[in-house]
Amino acid sequence: MAQVAYRKASRIFPGSPPVRAVDQLDLDIADGEFLVLVGPSGSGKSTALRMLAGLEDVDEGNIEIAGQDVTNVPPKGRDIAMVFQSYALYPHMTVAQNMGFALKLRGVSKDQIQSKVQEAAKLLDLSELLDRRPKALSGGQRQRVAMGRAIVREPSVFLMDEPLSNLDAKLRVETRANIASLQRRLRTTTVYVTHDQVEAMTMGDRVAVLESGLLKQVGTPAELYERPRNAFVAGFIGSPAMNLKTVPLTADGAKLDGLTVPLPREVLDVAAEQGLSSVIVGIRPESLRVASEGENGMELVVELVEELGADAFVYGTVRIAGDSQRFTVRVEGRSSPKLAETVKVTVRDSDDLHAFSPETGERLG
Amino acid sequence: MTATEAVVQTESRRSPPRRGGPPQRSDGRALRRSPLASVGLHAALIMASFIAIFPIFWVLVTSFKPDENALETTPKLINEPTVNNYSEVLAGDFGPFLTWFGNSLLIAGLTTVIGVFISATTAYAVSRFRFPGRRSMMLSFLVMQMFPFVVLIVPLYNLLLTFGLQGSVIGLVLVYCTTAIPFCTYLLKGYFDTIPIDIDEAGRVDGLSPFGVFWRLILPLARPGIAVTAFYAFLTAWGEVGFASAFLSGNSEGKTLAVGLQSFVSQTQVLWGHLAAASILIALPAVVVFYLVQRSLVSGLAAGGVKG
Ligand SMILES: Nc1ncnc2c1ncn2[C@@H]1O[C@H](COP(=O)(O)OP(=O)(O)OP(=O)(O)O)[C@@H](O)[C@H]1O
Ligand SMILES: [Mg+2]
C-alpha cells in the first residue's frame, strides 16, 4: 500500500523534433486509490505507466512511491507489479511457476509460494490450470494468469496497461467488473491505463485524461462528465461524444441555427472579458430533445438512427452559418424519427450546456 | 559444413515461433499436389539424399576392408571384412590417436562453451539495447564472414605470438571463436528478436536484474537457437585442419585429430582402410553432439507468452 506521485515528470524521446511523450506530468495518487489513465492512442499513457514501473527513463522531474523518490530506482526495487497488455507470461513456465516466480526470486520458501499461488488461483478461478503452460490457455485465461502473477506478490502498487484490450466484448465487461471488485477488496493502489473511456468511467475512483503527453484533467468520473475543464475532455468523455460546435456569440448566448441558446451570466462575462466573438458550445446528446410544435429549434436532417431499445441515438446534420454540422441527439426509443426526415431539435435545459474558448479550448465560467 | 547448413535451414524455417493465437494449430497445412509432381518431388529428394549419403556410406564400407583391398577396379561391398583397421588406429599404431582425440574434444568443447557464451551475450545486447556502433558492429560481422579464413592465418599467428599463446590450446580456441562468433551472433540475434521484449520487462518488474533476465528467461526460451549455435561452434573447431596445423605446437602429442589424420598419408602410399576407419571415428563425436542438439530443436518454445 502506498501513495504515488508524479512531480513534473517528463519523458522525452530523442528524435527530430524530440517527442515529449509525457510532458511535465503532475499527479498525486492516494493510497488504495484506483486511478485510470485515459487518452487517445499516442497520448503517452503507456509511457507514463512505464515511467512509474521504472521501465522508461524519467528525463525531467521525479516519481515518488510511498513518499520515496524512486526516479532512479530500477524496477525490481520499486515493489510494483505490472499487468502487460500482451500479458507477457513466461512461456517456458507453468501457470503456477509464472505466478510464483517473483516470490521465488525473493527467496520465499516453497511451501509459502505454493499456498500463496493457490490462494490467488482460487480467487481468479485458475486452480485447475496451475500445471499448464501459457501456450495451452485461452486469451481470457492468460489474462487471469497475468493478474494472478501481479496479485501473488502483494505489491504496494499495481500497474495495468490495457489489460482487457485483447479480450472479446463480453469477457471484457465481465473482467472489468472482476478487476474493479478485486481492487476494492485488496485496496492496493492501482494505476490502470486504457484508451476506452467507458472502462475509465466505470472502473476508476478518479480518471486522468492525457492528450499529447499533457494532463488535461483529473477528477472523479462524475466531475469529468459534468464539468469538463476543456473542450478535449468534453469531447473525449461520454459516449456518444458531446456535440462541440464553434458558433457566434450574441448578447444572449450562443447562436445555433434558428435557435439561440442562453448561456449563464458568468460565461458571458468571461467571454466578454476575453473579447471573444464566438464560443465552442458543448451539448451532450441527452441534453437535446425533439422540439414540440411551434417551438424554436435546429433543423436536423436525420442520417442514422441507432436503436438501443429504451432510447435511440439520432445522428444528423444541421446547417449552421452555411456549413453543415453533425449533431447527435438522444430520443425516446419508440418515437425515433426516420431516415432522411427533418426534425426540429432543441435544448432540454440550458444549465446542461458547456462553453469553451475557441482559442484555448479552456472552459468558460 | 553441409550438416550445419541443413540445421540452420531447418531452424530458420521454424522460427519465428508462432506467437499467441490458438495454440498448436498447425499453419503448415498440406498443399495440394498433383500425383506427378509428387513423384517428381520424391524422386528428386531421394536422388539428393543418395548423393549426400553415398560417400559416407562408402567410407564406412571401406573402413572394414584391408588397405590393399580398399581400392579395386571392381569395387565390392564386402571384401575380407575385418576390424583390424579400427583396432590398429585405436592402439596407436599411427600416432597417439586417443591423445589427439582428447585434444580435439577439449578444443572443440572449449570453443563451443566460450563461443556460445560470448555470442549469446553479444547477440542479446545487440537485440535489446541501442548503443553507438551497434549497426556497424553487425555489419563488420557480416563482412568478416566474406573473407576466406586462410588469409587470417598470418595476422592471427602474429597476434598469438605477441600474446604468448602461439602453440597453446587456448590460443587455438580463441582463433576458432573469432571465426565462429560473428556467425553465431547473427544467428542468435535473429532468434532473440523473435522473443517479445515484454517478457524481459515482466522479468525485470518481477525482480530480475538485466543479467537475470538474460539467464533465466531469454536463454531457456532461445534453446533451439542456442543448440544450433553450439553445434556450429563445435563443428568449426572439430574438423578444422588449417588453423590447427598452423597454431598448435609441432610435436606429435599436441595435434588434433584432423591434423593427425595426415599421418595416414605417408610419402609412399595412402592407407585407405585405416584412413576410413579413423574418419568414421572422427565423425562419431559430431554425430553424438548433433543428436544431443537436435532434441532441443523444437519449435514454438516462446509461443503463448504474449497475445496480440
Ligand atoms: N521508444 C520510443 N521512441 C520514440 N518515440 C516513442 C517511443 N515510445 C513511444 N513513443 C512516442 O511517444 C508517444 C506516446 O506513446 P505511448 O506508447 O505512451 O502512447 P499510448 O498513449 O500508450 O498509446 P496507445 O493507446 O496506442 O497504446 C507516441 O507519440 C509515441 O510515438
Ligand atoms: Mg499504450
Image (tube, rainbow, N blue to C red):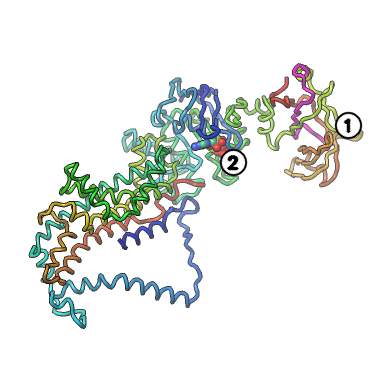
| Amino acid type of the residue that numbered disc 2 sits on in the rendered structure | Val
Density class for disc 1 (Cα within 10 Å; few <14, some 14-19, many ≥20) is: some
Q: Quadrant of residue B239?
A: bottom left
Frontmost of labels 2 and 1 is: 1
Q: Pinpoint residue A322: horizontal percent, then vertical percent.
A: 84, 36
Badge 1 marks a residue whose secondary structure is: loop
| Dot label at residue A296 | 1
Q: Identify whether B21 is placed above or below B54.
A: above
Mark earlier in primary sequence (2, 1): 2
In-front residue for pair A315/B62: B62
The answer to whether the residue bearing label 1 lies less than 8 angstroms from the nearest atom of ligand 1 is no
Regarding mark 2 in the picture, which secondary structure is present there?
helix
Residue B230 is situated, as x and y percent measured from the top left of the image, at 29, 52
Q: Measuring 67% from the left and 30% from the top, which residue is drawn there?
A: A232
Residue at the farthest bottom position: B74
Please name the residue that numbered disc 2 is placed on: A173
Assess whether residue B271 is covered by the magenta stretch: no
Q: Residues within 10 Å of mark 2 (few under 14, many from 20)?
A: few
Q: Residue furthest right?
A: A294
Count of numbered circles in the view:
2
Q: Separation of disc 2 and disc 1 at Cα?
A: 41 Å
Visible in this render: residue A149?
yes
Residue A288 lies in the magenta stretch: yes
Q: Position of residue A10 (x, y in %)?
A: 52, 27
Residues flagged by tags 2 and 1 on a common chain: yes
Which mark is drawn over residue A103? none
- In-front residue for pair A313/A126: A313
Write the start and end of the magenta stretch as one range.
A272-289
Which quarter of the image is occupied by the C terminus of chain A? top right
